[in-house]
Amino acid sequence: MKNVRIWFSKTGAACYISHLDLTRCMSRALRRAGLPVWYTEGFSPRILMGFAVPLSLGFESPRESMDIRLLEEVPAEELLKKLNDALPPDIHAFDVTDPVQSVNNIAFADYRMMFSGMKNPAEILRGLLAQEKIEVMKHSKKGPKPVDIRPFFAKASLEETDAESCELRCVLPAGNNGGINPMLLAEALKNAGYTPRVHVERRALLDANHELFR
Amino acid sequence: MYDKRLEPVLLDVQKPGRYVGGELNSVIKNKDEVDVRFAFCFPDTYEIGMSHLGMKILYGAFNEQPGVWCERVFAPWIDMEEQMRRLDVPLYALESGDPLDCFDFIGFTLQYELSYTNILNMLELGGIPLKSSERTGLRHIVIGGGPCACNPEPLAEFFDLFCLGDGEEVDLEVIELWRQCRDEGCSRQEFLRRAAKIPGVYVPSLYTVTYHEDGTVKACTPQDGAPERVHKRAVMDLDSMYFPKSFVVPYIETVHDRAVCEVLRGCHRGCRFCQAGFLYRPFREKSIETISAQCKALIESTGYDEISLSSLSTSDYRRLFELIDTLHTWTEDEKVSVSLPSLRVDNFSMELVERVQSIRKTSLTFAPEAGTQRMRDVINKNVTEEELLRTVNLAFSNGWSKVKLYFMIGLPTETMDDVRGIAALGQTVVDAYYNNPDHPRMAPSVSISAAAFVPKPFTPFQWFGQDNMETLHEKQRTLKGSSTNRKISISYHGAETSFLEAVFARGDRRLSAVLLEAHRRGLKFDGWDACFRFDEWMRIFEDLGISPDFYATRHRDFDEVFPWDHLDYGIRKEFLMEECRRAYRAETTPNCMEKCSNCGAACMKGGVCVEKRSDLVL
């Protein structure tokens, strides 16, 4: 038996698939692909699958991971071909590796946020980020609580694409020890009376040293 | 695919996965190689529509034809409709993202009466003129099929044609004729006139309906060479009938999210309240080999881990154990579970349960339909209390403690004693539990669910006036009040929706105006509690001067001409009358397996009719 980590992208219309739906989708794809996957034992056996940090609904990502256990080794090329043939078009597996790090090592995520649908979004964002404090309500299991997101966006870089759109790159905490959803910034804009259209891409997951999660 | 203008709002609506398409096995064709575009519309949400087997069958059958591209369209939920109207985005098909306006055929499946307002709403959202008379040229042929096509008269003004019975063959014939007509440069009228000559095709605009002074139908007269009677189509050999090798696999969870294989068509039981039992006669079975091969193909193409054996009454498949054993020869290795959608009280056995893993120990559901033997005899539900008790005892001895029982109230000849009999039967089941020494170590739970009976065309109860709402409410109260046992929970469905369903089920063409007005006033999704506005419906009837009671609660005489009398489902009206008389005498009729009762379905020369009637001349 061999544990492998499959790397895939989730783009386009696939961003509207929730994490729960993604797991069902992957399980069916693995079955269709006819790969020798290991099933959990018990009354209703399921394919053992492990995902890193769930991707929020609406986010695209060029690099997601899924851990599975194979009963026998399958050459990477064959595995990717079979799996891609069984996957819907907007989910594409592009690499298979050994699982180098535990998902518990994930500490940050690198995001690219595209703001549009409002006038001078760059200027407004700059103004917002220049504030001492940006307080928004964060919804957690214990209910909503106010949180200052300003420190998380301190190192964010802003790039104006044109008068009606801009791009923000930021690295935010992510992973099992708690994360910050980049959409909280959109929330802050909404609180300030703006209604931007925000499209988010999660570029990569990073470990505590800001190295790429492998 | 979807209109990019929707992108900004997709995250503001519930379940955006409903609206984006791109699912596995959805069919994308090159438009240059397509000369017929068919929009298959399901007038309800994505999750309901994607669970419907008929749509999967026809989607596959159409797309297998070269040059034909069939796409799926569902009713957007109210939040999405609001956004689409705000952004001026027309209703589109999920494969190409093209608006309805781009399609040659706009097909609707007519599964339940309460979806009619959604049909009008979808046409309007797609920019299609609502009335057949307002559409010109050869495009935008609005076509309907499914169970409600047996009395499509309330929809007559909006549809160009209806296909009666099994759609697998007749739909393709209509498409082929349309191609010919287009190539010959025929007018829309000429196409419709020629379509009416295809067996199974009903073109409502070619029939004139006249009425008596009392409002009942006087005659329905064909014109332009349309047939006097339109006979339903039925495919007799299910083994050679088209069945899809793959299903579109939704991303989001749908109501029935699994592979489904139809194992038989029709039902031989003859329950008098059940429209499907008459519409889909005769009883026809697929062979074990075909079913197993079709299941296997579906599992391979979809990746599902569950397969459901579907039909009106799957436990009536005569070689059921053999079928399940055959499936198990490969499903166990592939970790696929096999499930049955419904069980009958009279053929439930441990042998069956052991073979079907999906029957979990949580709860078992049965439908005795009525509480007293007399009432069950009236409706010809040939199930006895002894059989029910035998079955629940079997279940209780084998670890079950929860039972769900489905009933109807408002059945013909029903008295308050019959209503109280429902709760009494629930009590009998609870008593049986405690008297069974092997029952599990937990408290039993019996859930009773009672729906209000809706009389339907082509059943022996088509003459019956539905109980009025006061009576139904009184029966609901009586039922609720006739048990104080906390082990028994009693619930019932709204009498209001059943009343409206009864109006449209046996309605005539004058109800088109009601539907149009309902649509104008924004009524939609009437089958959903969140949207159903009964008071508004009643106001519409009042404003238009149309009595809903004329359709729902009025008793008809045997000599009345019905709005659907020119449609022929192979069932003789005299047979239905005889069944009606027997019902009122509480006399049962044997099922088709025991004895042929000469209902008329033998005219289709297939299925159980051929097996059971040696005198049948083929």
Image: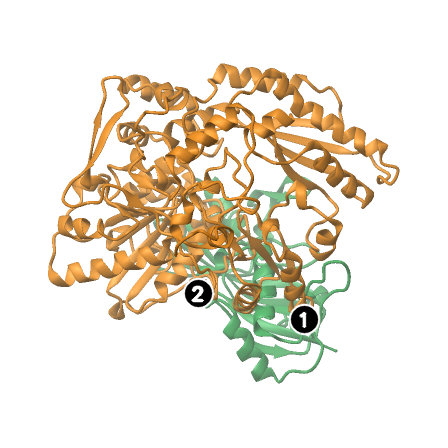
Chain colours: A green, B orange
Q: Foreground: B577 or B196? A: B577
Q: Which residue is mark 2?
A: B240
In the displayed structure, B210 sits above or below B436; it is above
Q: Is A160 positioned to the left or the right of A91 in the image?
A: left
**Location of residue B472 with respect to B436 vertically, above or below:** above
Residue at label 1? Answer: A68
Kindly report which numbered mark, 2 or 1, lies closer to the viewer in this rendering.
Answer: 2
Horizontal arrangement in the rendering, residue A201 relative to residue B92 (left or right): right
In the displayed structure, would residue B199 be above or below residue B371?
below
**Disc 2 chain ID:** B
Q: Which three-letter amino acid code belongs to the residue tagged 2?
A: Ser
Q: Amino acid at mark 1?
A: Ile
Q: Residue at x 34, y 19 (%)?
A: B539
Of residue B99 and residue B452, the one placed in the foreground of this image is: B452
Task: Find residue B91 and report its horizontal and vertical position in percent.
Answer: 32, 48
Identity of the residue drawn at 57% across and 60% down: A22
Between B72 and B223, the one nearer to me in the picture: B223
The crowding category of the residue bearing disc 2, from other C-alpha atoms within 10 Å (few below 14, some 14 to 19, many at least 20), is few
